[in-house]
Amino acid sequence: MSRTRLTYQDLDRLWRRGREFLGCDYAVLGGAMSWVSERNLVAAISNAGGFGVLASGSMPPDLLDKEIAATKALTDRPFGVNLITMHPQLDELIDVCGAHRVGHVVLAGGLPTSAAIKRVKAFGAKAICFAPALVLAKKLVRAGADALVIEGAEAGGHIGPVSTSVLAQEILPSMAPLVPVFVAGGIGRGEAMLSYLEMGAAGVQLGTRFVCAFECIAHPKFKQAFLRASARDAITSMQIDPQFPVIPVRAIANAGTERFMEMQRTVIDRFHRGEVDQKSAQLEIEHFWAGALRRAVIDGDVENGSLMAGQSVGMVTSEQSVEAIFDEIIGQALDALDQRNRASATPEEAKGVA
Ligand SMILES: Cc1cc2nc3c(=O)[nH]c(=O)nc-3n(C[C@H](O)[C@H](O)[C@H](O)COP(=O)(O)O)c2cc1C
């Protein structure tokens, strides 16, 4: 379909603020995914016109230093770094970003302190924070956050309880006029991206959709699990007893998911029989998934490892280059805009001459 000039202008009008904030062609962040978003995928996303974000996970500062340097060797376009706020060396990790003049730091995994936000901004970077509710979005902006990511429960990995569509309705009307807000969770196609842009988002963040990129180093078995899964296979980890909380994680169900349930039952029975105290039982539950994402992504242990994935996994149907993924998503958004423009255009506009 040949698109009218209006169409391109419309998309640009919708996401220009996000593009300018990130300094790239498409206001699409490649959401940081531990073990997955390393130098290759991050550089490929930035080189293709999006905004790659390095996942630092539990990396110590010297490893992050090497990974940023290696990413810079693969791209001269802007990319960001995702830091986990509860990392014991958060300040040092921020300083590593400062030494590399990283332009954007995403503070994830819990609410960042205003001191952490200030430290990021002190070297001139933009601080991007996750806002799980409107009241916290306001608090983060007061603390100096330059932009927000709102991530709904459809997303892969650690999630909150509220869906993307509800978070968007709650947060965009009051926060989008103040700072750029990027919407994440469950976005697999361009029409969905467009709808959030039309609601006031500055851009979107996608994770799951990039896992099966050729440039992604994830183990072939990890990618295969994504290609086979449908939306309903990406389920949240279950807690069987409120006395023993489980942090909700969305992942493709596998044998590990079953074993996790059995393990919880066994440990909780031992607690009730007085064989183990509450703290040790809780620790056993928390440690079950330690190292599990690495086992799946890097070693290809798709039975026992963690197959973190969002519900958009059903829309991942083939291995593609990052460039092809962008072409597809942006093409879908443009086609949707184009259909509307044609319906309301004058004959000259419809021919693309206006
Ligand atoms: C395998 C995997 C690992 C992830 N690891 C992280 C992480 O380390 N830090 C983070 O902030 N978000 C992490 N996420 C969330 C993504 O950054 C992104 O927000 C999410 O994938 C968006 O939802 P989608 O998967 O539906 O596109 C992870 C997601 C996946 C699928």
Image (cartoon, grey):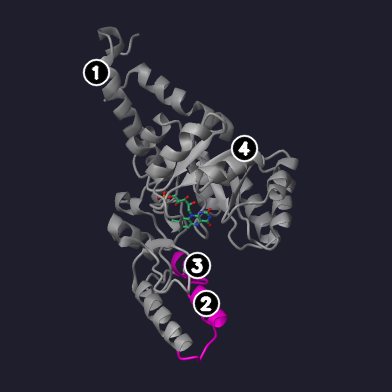
Q: Which segment is the magenta one?
A: 273-299
Q: Where is the N terminus found, in terms of image quarters?
A: top left
Look at the image and say whether residue 100 sits in the magenta stretch. Answer: no
Q: Nearer the viewer, mark 1 or mark 3?
A: 1
- Residue 282: numbered disc: 2
3D distance between C-alphas at marks 4 and 3: 31 Å
Badge 3 density bin: few <14, some 14–19, many ≥20, Cα 10 Å = some
Which badge, 2 or 1, is on the more N-terminal residue? 2
Residue at image mark 1:
343
In percent of width and height, residue 238 lies at: 39, 68
Q: Determine whether, in the image, residue 85 is placed left or right of residue 299.
A: right
Location of residue 159 by image quarter: bottom left
3D distance between C-alphas at marks 2 and 4: 37 Å
Q: Is residue 141 above or below residue 219?
A: above
Q: Is residue 106 above or below residue 250?
A: above
In percent of width and height, residue 347 lies at: 25, 8
Residue at image mark 4:
146
**Tag 2: amino acid:** Gln
In percent of width and height, residue 123 lies at: 74, 41
3D distance between C-alphas at marks 4 and 1: 38 Å
Badge 1 density bin: few <14, some 14–19, many ≥20, Cα 10 Å = few
Which badge, 2 or 4, is on the more N-terminal residue? 4
Q: How many callouts does the rendering have?
A: 4
Q: Determine whether, in the image, residue 232 is placed left or right of residue 323.
A: left
